[in-house]
Amino acid sequence: RIMGRLADDSIVDALVEILSERALFKGSLLQPTKQAALDALAQMGTEKAQQALRDAAAARDKFVASAANDILSHQQKTE
């Protein structure tokens, strides 16, 4: 969450890497970490972070895609 407050685009790539992590066993253990990465991107609000969220919304990982779509939908409602 602290990363999101920094609004530093240099962090976006690291957050995107977290979103693409795959666990061979018990992949659901990564879900809280992936959710935190998505939340940080949303908090950043930079164009690069927003693009990363849009890309995540189309991810193969169903959890990431669903969570990213939820965030984007919420952002649209609050604009």
Image (cartoon, rainbow, N blue to C red):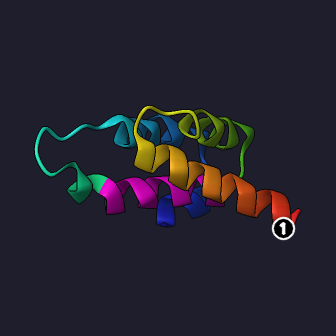
Asked if residue 7 lies left or right of residue 13, the reply is right
Image x and y of residue 78, in percent: 84, 67
Of 70 and 19, the residue lying toward us: 70
Q: Main secondary structure of the magenta part?
A: helix
Q: Mark 1 is on which residue type?
A: Thr
The answer to whether one can see residue 7 in this image is no
Image x and y of residue 20, in percent: 36, 35
Q: Is residue 64 magenta?
A: no
The answer to whether one can see residue 2 in this image is yes
**Residue drawn at x 52%, y 44% as measured from the top left:** 65
Of 34 and 1, the residue lying toward us: 34
In this rendering, the answer to whether 50 lies above or below 43 is above
Asked if residue 31 lies left or right of residue 65, the reply is left
Q: Is residue 40 magenta?
A: yes
Image x and y of residue 28, in percent: 25, 55
Image x and y of residue 55, in percent: 59, 32
Asked if residue 26 lies left or right of residue 46, the reply is left
Q: Secondary structure at mark 1?
A: helix
Among the 4 quarters of the image, the one containing residue 57: top right
**Residue drawn at x 53%, y 40% as measured from the top left:** 12
Report the residue marked by disc 1. 78
The region drawn magenta spans 31-43
Of 39 and 71, the residue lying toward us: 71
